[in-house]
Amino acid sequence: MKRPEPLIAPSILSADFTRLGEHIDEAMDGGADWLHCDVMDGHFVPNISYGPMIVEAARTRQDAFLDVHLMISDPEKYIDAFAKAGSDQISIHCEATPHLHRALQMIHQSGCKAGVAINPGTPVFELDPILHMVDIVVVMSVNPGFGGQKFIKESLHRIEQLSRMRNSSGHPFLIEVDGGVNLDNTQRIIAAGADVLVAGSAVFKTDSIADTIGKMRKNAERALRPVV
Ligand code: DX5
Ligand code: ZN
């Protein structure tokens, strides 16, 4: 299977919320492919971030592909609200509901693409029964809950495992990596089999959002087309 071009999805969790609109514009004008929205409920993860209102605000500001990552318990209850807010894709955690299959069906029924996210402590083979029905798998490379954490290096092996599962199953889901992604590890993450890079602090906590996205893209492409 031919590898797609790597996509960059800045996480607005690390944006300056006093000027969220401008930061969203800078990321999109700077070449971001998607906008990643991190929703935390203070229950599934220890932190609380924001709800559908911010997704709706992002939707109003830009015609971007909104990649919504729900780090919430019982995500079924909120799928409709996030779909109505303008999400293009909704990912839920496999650890967050006993009814993963049904929840993924609900996301598709809401008109959104469906993703499953997996914590660093959960074996990737647990996703096997639902891989045929997801558009994307979000491999968490930090324990979810906070931006600005260090990339867990064992995640590279998990990306490789999942990439092999994709090849052997033939299911065409994308692999997204979320947490601690920066300019130094981009190339290794893409080389391991990832297609989509989520980056929060690496993009928004820099002097130039556009420069950082440009450099990240170059590093990612280098993994697919090594310079000889
Ligand atoms: C972690 C979130 C991530 C996070 C990424 O709980 O899901 O999307 O905001 O932020 P950085 O890139 O700063 O690790
Ligand atoms: Zn995320």
Image (cartoon, helix red, strand yellow):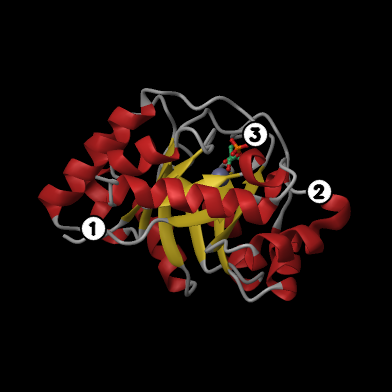
User: Is tag 3's residue or tag 2's residue first in the polypeptide sequence?
Assistant: 2
Q: Residue furthest toward the right? A: 18
Q: CA distance from mark 3 to mark 2?
A: 24 Å
Please indicate, yes or no, whether residue 110 appears anywhere in the rendered image: yes
Task: Please say if 84 is above or below 126.
Answer: below
- The residue singled out by tag 1 in the image is 132
Q: Quadrant of residue 24?
A: bottom right
Q: Nearer the viewer, mark 1 or mark 2?
A: 2
User: Is tag 3's residue or tag 1's residue first in the polypeptide sequence?
Assistant: 3
Task: Give the camera-side residue of 171 and 185.
Answer: 185
Disc marking residue 16? 2
Q: Position of residue 204 (x, y in %)?
A: 70, 46
Please indicate, yes or no, whether residue 10 appears anywhere in the rendered image: no
Q: Could you tell me the amino acid type at mark 1?
A: His
User: Is tag 1's residue or tag 2's residue first in the polypeptide sequence?
Assistant: 2
Task: Please say if 156 is above or below 116.
Answer: above
Of helix, strand and loop, which one carries label 3?
loop
Residue 17 lies left or right of residue 128; in this view the side is right
Q: Residue furthest toward the front? A: 228
Q: Could you tell me the amino acid type at mark 3?
A: His
Disc marking residue 43? 3
Residue 143 lies left or right of residue 131; in this view the side is right
Q: Position of residue 116 (x, y in %)?
A: 40, 49
Q: CA distance from mark 3 to mark 1?
A: 29 Å
Of helix, strand and loop, which one carries label 2?
loop
Of helix, strand and loop, which one carries label 1?
helix
Quarter holding the C terminus is top left
Q: Position of residue 190 (x, y in %)?
A: 35, 44
- On whether ligand 1 comes within 8 Å of the CB at mark 2, the answer is no
Name the residue rendered at 71%, 42% in the picture: 206
Task: Give the camera-side residue of 23 and 111.
Answer: 23
